[in-house]
Image (spheres, coloured by chain):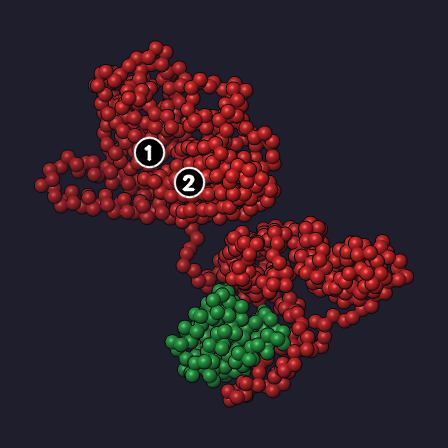
Chain colours: A red, B green
Amino acid sequence: MTIDMSQFFQVFFDETEELLAEKERLLLGVDLANPGKEDLDAIFRTAHSIKGGASTFGFSDMADITHVLESLLDKIRKGEMTLKTEHVDAFLAAKDVLKMQLDGHRNGAEVDLGAVEEIRGRLALLSQNIKSGLPATGAASTPGMSAASLHSGNGKQLRKLHISLPAMPEQDLKILAAELALLGALEHIPDGSKPAVLTLLTTENTDEIISICAFMVDTDDLKISEEPVSSNTDTTQAEDDIGYGFFDSMAELGINVDQKLLPQVSEPVLNLAPNVLNNAPAQQDAKPREAEKEKNHPNHESSSIRVSIEKVDQLINLVGELVITQAMIEQRTDTLDPIAHERLLESVNQLTRNTRDLQEAVMSIRMLPMDYVFSRFPRMVRDLAGKLSKKVEFITHGASTELDKGLIERIVDPLTHLVRNSIDHGIETPDIRLASGKSETGKLSLSAGHQGGKIVIEVSDDGAGLNRTKILEKAKKQGLDIPDEISDSEVWQLIFAPGFSTAEIVTDVSGRGVGMDVVKRNITAMGGVVDIRSTKGSGTAITISLPLTLAILDGMSIKVGDEIYILPLNFVVESLQPVPDDIKEISGQGRVVRVRGEYLPLISLYQIFAITPRFTNPAQGIIVILETDGQKVGLLIDELIGQQQIVVKNLESNYRKVNGISGATILGDGGVSLILDVSALIASRQTSDAELICS
Amino acid sequence: MSKTILAVDDSSSLRQMVAFSLKAAGYQVIEAVDGRDGLDKAKNQTVDLVLTDQNMPRMDGLALIKALREIQSYQRVPILMLTTESSDEMKAQGRAAGANGWLVKPFDPQRLIEVVKKVIG
């Protein structure tokens, strides 16, 4: 009976992917000063499990890396070596390489073999520092080949060489040892006072070693002798052939097993490193290719299915149409006599509820947890903080909050930018923090949660805060028009101006000028709003509010003249009918309306769209207060019709871009209504009054 | 009636491979994700053979073997370790814990079935 191993590949890929993510999470969370035994064990176990699977299923390249990784981790968890930053760095880099190899097997993605060799050498060098006492930093940065040579799969014979050196200064001996370590695993480095013997496991030939030593010692004083490598001894070979064995206790159970298989385990002679890698079934090397052919093996058990996003979107579109039809029915039955048509109206109500449930269920297919975005930050924060010599504690909240897939993908870039900014410009270096009475470790927090019908994502830090003076200076230098009295929140909004950066030093991290304006533009395009709160010396918080989805929005239908428009409900603060005294004319600025002591600019919708309204006098019509980016305006309309969920139809793809309009929707009666672009309406106030923004 | 094997491994791919192979060879298989899960499942039902990985969270293979040997009904059930460590030290530890034999990872399905057949037929 033959069993096709490729049927387990998919499970192995998924499992490895999870293990790698788990490994990264554990590594980022590990306390270097006092690493917990359980954490170290768990990190070890991730490497160990990947190795086990990779060797079983024939992915020898991954087994190879995890083998080196595992041995180093084993030394650390056993306390033979202290965990240092360079270990964590190397482990993270190894994780990246393993992920690359995994993607290679899984999707046929390209694998950078140079990076594989680099990390293998780096891990092997770190393994040797246990005895060499060499500074780990130096070793870590050397692109080594040592472990590569350890792996006898390259066709060369692995040999153990004893290199006898004459007495030499300790410094020279260390340099020489570091050079030799590049050729293989260096086992023993004594101090340099007396003649020393180094033991090197290598596949390099003796001439190569002599030529390296010739830089430091007289070759006449050099003796090199060879010892056969223990793992190739006959006993282990025999054992490898069998791969299993029974203790004599088996006989006691009344089970007759071949007595030849009973091992001699009573005297542990040598603690041989298990040469598992050589044991990996060579005949399976060809199997990864098969994996590509059989990516979705039918036997693969799973509680989820993969569906193309097009199919989901088609479903959403159809449900959208259904919502419209349902609204149409609801509207048409509205005029019927409730007593005569009781049963029909009941059914229509039922239909309404079902439609809404169906719509929510379908929308939820596209929802992904924010963790999809958040999970990429711990690593980035660590790398950046390291690069900038800052100490940053990174916290996330609400990673399970769900957001539409389309939005989640578009939020990645803006969030990345904000997180970078926080580390680069917000959080101070440890000495500055200490000097200003803060703990030397800065706090950076990323949170997500629902607020009303919106999702609110916040990036906050306890860094230096925004500098009002500097922003104003820079804004003036850039020729921005700055009013004399300007509130903090208006000053903060200035950093969203194109090309604005107050960074004194343009680092390779951030501060190149393309920045906050792009962030703002991206978020506005998603129907979102950015808000900044900042206190000098104690930090900055940037809040992004996004609609849950782009396809459906809660709208308020309003009427001006014969036209019906939709206002997205999230911009609407309130609506009111003002008394004549509250309307004032200010020369040069048009009309304003007083709402609880605050004067708000008044925009007349009929002027903007050049329609004939029922009322031109604000005191007769209705004023809807709209808010965006911390700015409020009053919008004069004729009448409010009602609130409803609407399916957004893109105007650009069906007609063309129209200023002041963000989209269209189909009403219950089949008519088309335009959705007002509130940000553009408010912006229009700043250009010379409501100068026809529609073309 | 076909014989039942308890397969304990924290790696789901290896567990699936072991279970699939053994089922294909006509055995019944109970899967457990770590030592503690294995112990719980072993307590619920007596099995004819236990195959356990060594390195697992919560309870490792050696601890599981020791715990099983404490249970009256498991004193004479064959237990095999599936381990990447084939060192003599590991074998001695396994033997002391009460294992009856070992199978070195990686192994292929044929090898596994061959070994299992030797033990429980």
| Residue A488, percent from left and from top | 43, 26
Residue plotted at (25% across, 27% down): A575
- Determine the residue positioned at 62% across, 58% down: A82
Mark 2 crowd level (few <14, some 14–19, many ≥20, 10 Å Cα): many
In the displayed image of the protein, which residue is found farthest to the right? A220
In this orientation, does residue A229 appear? yes
Q: In this view, does A50 lie above or below A366?
A: below
Residue type at mark 1: give it.
Asn
Left or right: B83, with B33 as reference point: right
Chain to which the residue tagged by mark 1 belongs: A
- The amino acid pointed to by label 2 is Ile
Indicate the secondary structure of the residue bearing disc 2.
Answer: strand
Alpha-carbon distance for marks 2 and 1?
16 Å
Give the residue at the far top of this rendering: A587
What chain does mark 2 sit on?
A
Check whether the beta carbons of the residues at disc 2 and disc 1 lie within 8 A of each other. Answer: no
Residue A457 is labelled as: 2
Q: Position of residue B102 (x, y in %)?
A: 56, 77
- Occupied quadrant, residue B107: bottom right
Q: Residue at x 33, y 33 (%)?
A: A570
Tell me what residue is drawn at x 84 percent, y 58 percent: A168
Q: Quadrant of residue A349?
A: top left
Near-viewer residue (A15 or A146): A146
Please state if A507 lies on the left or on the right of A449 as rendered: right
Q: Mark 1 points at which residue?
A: A570
